[in-house]
Each structure stands twice: as C-alpha cells, then as structure tokens.
Image (cartoon, rainbow, N blue to C red):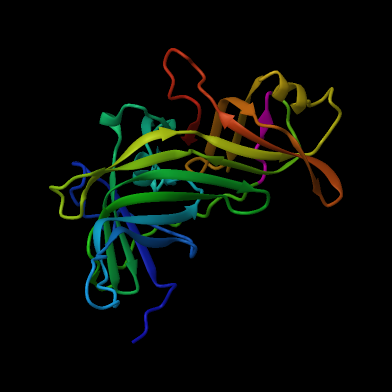
Amino acid sequence: MPKLTRRRVVLAKTEATYGVDASPDPATDAFICNVSSNITPSGEEVTRDYVRDVLSPIGSVVTTKTVALTIQTELKGGGMEDTDILPPEYEPLLLACGMKKSGDAATGWVYQPESDPAKHDSCTIYYYQDGLLHKAIGCRGSFKIDASVSALGTIEFSMTGLWVDPVDEAMPSPVIADIVPPIVAGLGLTVGGYSPVCNALSFDLGVSTSQRKDINSSTGVTGIEIQSRTPTGSIDPEAVTLAEFNPWTAWSGSTKAAISATVGSDIGNRISISIPKAQYGVPAYGDRDGILTYSLAFTATIDDAGTGDDEVVLTYA
C-alpha cells in the first residue's frame, strides 16, 4: 500500500538526560503540526576516490549523521484545567530552543532566553509518517513566530537531533487538546508607545546550533549545542506624519523602542510577546493596496545589561 503525505503525527517530550530517549506518549505529548512540517536526514559523505585500473566510481561512505526537523504548529495556549493555566502543548520544543520557564498555573507561564549551556533542555521527537517512525533524540534548535492579520498565528520550530534509524511502526492515536487558536486580531500592538496600523508581526529567535563530533559516537555526533542567538523580527506599519511616528530618527540615532502585542483574549489561550528594546534596521517604504507603509526590521537587544537573557519574553496566560 502507498504511504500518504497527510497521515502524520508528531510527539515531543523533554529529556531528563541529554540524548536519552524520553519516550513521548501519544496520550500526553502530541500536538497538531501543519502540512508544511518535514523531516530531513543529514550526513557527511566521504568519496572513495582511489587510483585504479578502471574509471568506474567506487562510491562514498556516510560518516556523521544527524536529522533536521521543521515543525510548524498553531500559535495557541495550553488551555485550562479547572482553574489552572496549562503550558502550551509544544512546550518541550520551546525549552529545547534555549528558553527557560517561570511563572505558575495561577498567573501563567513565562518563557525567555537562557545563556547557560548547563541549563539548556533537549527533547525527544517522534515523527510518524504513515507507519514510518523517525526518532530524533537530543534535539535543540530555534523558532519563528508569524502573526498576520485575520489569520491564525503560527510558530515554526527548526530542530536538529541525533540520528536514529527509522522503523516501521503502527500509527498512534494521539490525544490533542480541543483548543481553537485565536485569530490575529485585537493584538494591541505598540511600538515605543505608538499604536500603528499594521498587518503583520514576525519574530525569529535566531538560535544557532553546532554539532559535537565524537569518534566514540556510533553516528559521529554526540550532541547538538546552542552556541549563539540573534533575535530579529519585522513589522509593516502604515506611514504617518513624522510627528506621530518617526522610524528614520530612531534608526539614525540607534534609538531602541519597546514592542509588545498579545494574541488572543481568553484565559489559557493568550500569548503575549514583549521585546523591551528593539533596534531598527534601515527603514524602507512599502505599499499595501495603495497605502504607503514602512518595512521595519528590528533586532531584539538586551534590556538589563546586568542580567541579560531578557531581549524577548513570551507569556502564556
């Protein structure tokens, strides 16, 4: 029988020990992923190029092996259990992007960057593709948030994990929380205190990872490490008088502005994005149905120079 593209289940669970299969359970660790999600094995190949009596190629040998996963899901909260606010179903992926968690079930859950490698979580991802199971362990990576008007917000994770050979495995029956994601409307977006007319807000955590290559590892790689991050984003506000909003002087003077927005209004399904000190790149003009706009890229920079790890804060409440 042929395999179907749309028959797909993704599970993720935080690992207690790095690189040790956390055995995610379809009853507790599943979440919806969009059809654009995919999995891509990656390996280095060494060509066996030796002098011999014929010109026929010998072939190559695959050495180090990892696996890359792109997983896009809906930007939504974890809902409520009685009076408790639950974390989002994709929390293991958030934490594996070098984010740390604080808060509580009464007020909500807060996620912001963590620089200490010893505190970086990892996760195990099970990626089922119509009876084919790919396991990725020791996964770490980055994410992008896209919030475009009158659409459903998305969060897309780009993860890299240690290679495990795929196997035939029956499709599980995942338990997915019945939570309708909020539309991108009524965000209360402000930029330095100004409320622009804007179509889209995007944010990219900008985490870079590296491989720890190891001759003792059966795949040649013993770990995936977070080594840097450069958080960036963009907005596209309508152009108004410079007295109302002047991105040119903000750019030329290297002035930083706070950006904040909240997707959703229901308790348990609200996601607030706070960037205390966004620094603009070079502004550019754009056009939206004949209306003059700005294309404003920004970098999320450190807020408190004494502590750091505060350039972006996500709150699920």
> Where, by quadrant of the figure, is residue 134 drawn?
bottom left
Q: On the picture, is 21 further left or further right than 271?
A: left
As drawn, which residue projects farthest toward the front? 53
Across and down, in percent, residue 149 comes to 68, 49
As drawn, which residue projects farthest toward the bottom? 1
Q: Is residue 286 above or below residue 246?
A: below
Query: What span is in magenta?
Result: 185-192
Across and down, in percent, residue 173 comes to 31, 68
Residue depicted at x 41% and y 78%: 4
* Numbered disc total: 0
Q: On the picture, is 163 further left or further right than 300?
A: left
> Where, by quadrant of the figure, is residue 263 drawn?
top right
130 inside magenta stretch: no
Is residue 15 visible in this depiction of the protein? yes
- Between 246 and 198, the one lying in front of the other is 246
Is most of the magenta stretch helix, strand or loop? loop
Q: On the picture, is 312 further left or further right than 121?
A: right
Across and down, in percent, residue 38 comes to 42, 62
